[in-house]
Image: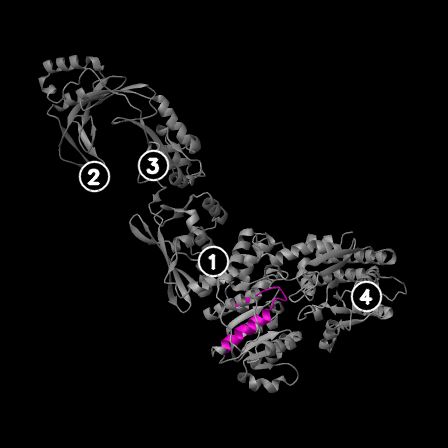
Amino acid sequence: MGWGEAREGRIEWKPGSGRGVAPHLVVPGAVALNAEPPVYVEEANGVIGPVQLGLPPRLACQFLAAPSIPRAKLEEVSRRLSQRLPELHHGLLPVPPATAVLIDEDPRPVLRLKLGHVGPSYYYYRNKSEHSGPAAVASLGFRYGAFDIDPSQRASRLELFQGGQVYAIARRQGKEKQARKRLSDTGLADARSAFPLLDYRHATDLTLSDQRGWFDFLARHAEQLRSEGFEILIDDDFPFRLADSSGEFDATLETSGIDWFELALGIEIDGERRDLAPLLAALVSAPGFSPELLTQLAGKGERFLLPLADGRHLALAADRFLPLVLALHGLHMSGAFDDASSKVRLSRAEVVPLLGVENEHFAFRSADNLRRLAGLLQTRGLTAPELPSTFRATLRTYQAQGVAWLDLLRESGLGGILADDMGLGKTVQILALIALEKARGHLANPALVVAPTSLMTNWSAEATRFAPDLKVLVLHGADRKHKFDAIGDHDLVLTTYPLIARDRETLLAREWHMAVLDEAQTVKNPDAATTRWLRETKAKHRFCLTGTPMENHLGELWSIMSFVNPGYLGDKAAFSRRWRTPIEKRADKVRTTALARRVKPFLLRRTKTEVATELPAKSEMVETIVLEGPQRDLYDSIRLTMSRKVREAIAKRGLAKSHIVVLEALLRMRQACCDPALLKLNDGLDRPSAKLDRLIEMVGELLSEGRKIIVFSQFTSMLDLIRKRFDADGLRYSLLTGETRDRKAAIEAFQGGTADVFLISLKAGGVALNLTAADTVVIFDPWWNPAVEEQAIDRAYRIGQDKAVFVYRLVAAGTIEEKMDELKARKRALADGLFDRDGGIASALTEGDVNALFDA
């Protein structure tokens, strides 16, 4: 410290010990210290200096050290001092009146929020304490008139001296107790109990055991306390502070490059314009962010706290910001942004979910050219385009909406998955879009459709029927290479998945206006060569058609989406980390909902229930078949043998590397359920098939009722066994397997009435069949994948059917087939989880599931 100049001071009577008064040294703007001579201290400026009182230094020091005097004796003491020491009287204020001024009013509680002081032991123990620093505390005082009373004083009556006047305060201790109780209701409690290292001199301080609760206290309780009469003072060093804002904001999406946009959310905070976008991005990126908690706050009409860079927090209405924050959270989880320290930069596809949160509170500025994309979130709001007069199909309402959705994706340079149920006309919707593009003059390059081999005839026939104006080229058969030079002369080119490997040098080298994958579940394996080659297709617009965009796991959805919108769901490793593992392994509902929200704009799925009210009712029944005698003995023997083999394989190599062993075991057990003859044991034993016997009985009964029947089996060898029985009974039937050369003749025989029963194998009849003549479907052997089984049923249960459809599933009791049905529910949940409101998704098949399949 430096020595400063002398300053004027004075001596005042102030309360001393007990109820007396004593002389005190006063120096305005500084701390006065009794010394010889008296001095003042200015700590802020580092200055110490003498005080001028007009008294000898020794006399001033002795007088200021005098003990307290009863207030009643003050006048007499002052008179005698003035007689003996006249010079002293000039340094004193006038003698106060003997009668005190009474302050008779309720106290005003004053709550000061500050940084708690710590005792000396803190610095020794702080590294051993779980708390890294002093706690924030609240000091409660009471204001009576102009006086602040420390609640630690227990006296019910206080006398205070100020400006030469004595004031008497009769404390309202009942009111003070009520104020302390009110603070206790907010969660404030004794600070020293929560943090023992706080300075003992502040024993009445209050605090919150969870220091993070201070923001909630300021946001929720402080305003209410003020309305109840509390005065709340906040020190500058209080570590938890709120910024002030009206909460009004504007949102903009500015172009920052080709198909890239920057999100900005302008808001005024304490008079300064700030961008909330990076702050909200940082909030949703934080490890502890909870969408559920924000949703709960919104439901209660409460606010959430947004951290600012300067340590303050901004309280914002949760219900108002909820849709926007949830959309940003979904974008973050999908990898749209990780570093939120600067502008939030989004692709055109990533902008779409944000457009869906526009409401009466705000709309994005500078986004007029993007706003139509919001229609991807609500297909029903789209206006169906006017189809060219050359297009000959009359579209149903939902089909016209589907074309509008596809056209909006095309207009925006984005791809999509049309995932309508089988039989709802996905082919005709794509043909309508291609016809539109030709009428607009956009087909400078042709459109390419890749489909299963069995659908080539269907695509060609549908195009001829509904869009005869299109020039169609079918690249199929041994002579197809001779047609390569004519590709550019056509509007629509059709080829098959198997031919991609052979023709990729030609097909993938040229530019296409549009690329469409039909039955896109064919490319569900992202590592398959055909899938990888198709991703390299050079097409301006990309679409997928599939009734089952996901059959077994989310990796299949990623594979299809990576074709239509490359990179939108990240690379395969990132997708597994962000989505597959949390959803399939941990049943993470938050991730499920977020993924559904992210995929929704680019996946349009309508079910028969939604759009086909004219479709007749479908009745499904399970026929339980009891295996007896030699067939049961054989099944149990195979089960025991296979169970031991599978368990040994899993124990040795683990489930992931025992896939082939498990499949072989399941196959043999299923064959034993269907017919022992499928096992080809050649042991000379006669083992009848309970299932086959029951099927013959059922067919006889159903035919007598005039039914038209489809019988599905996954095993073509089983169909051969059924044929022999049908031949023996003189039944009329058609057969369709992978070896059937004339599919058309087989189909027409059944549809036209020549055959009463249609025997179909899974691979040959799972797609591209419209068998509305049938009204009964028999699933001879239950299939592992419920989605594929539904596809088979949909051969009869589809648009155009005018009869009730009955479905019979033949299940062998107490066998692998029953246990497969138990797991089917979980398979279905996995397949449908992206499309239902709850977003429930089942876990993947586990080792426990495999073991259960082989138990008795």
Indicate yes or no whether the magenta region holds residue 330: no
Closer mark to the observer between disc 1 and disc 3: 1
Near mark 4 (Cα within 10 A), the count class, few <14, some 14-19 or many ≥20, is: some
Kind of element beneath mark 3: strand
Q: Is residue 546 left or right of residue 695?
A: left
**Mark sitting on residue 678:** 4
Residue 435 drawn at (x, y percent)? 53, 76
- Give me the disc on residue 45: 2
**Are dots 1 and 4 in contact, CB under 8 Å?**
no
Q: Is residue 142 above or below residue 793?
A: above
- Give the residue number, with chain letter if any, for mark 3: 114
Mark-to-mark CA distance, 4 and 3: 84 Å
Per the image, label 2 sits on a secondary structure element best described as loop
Which residue is depicted at the point 58% across and 72% down? 428
> In this image, 706 relative to 470: left or right?
right
Residue 33 picture location, percent across and down: 21, 28
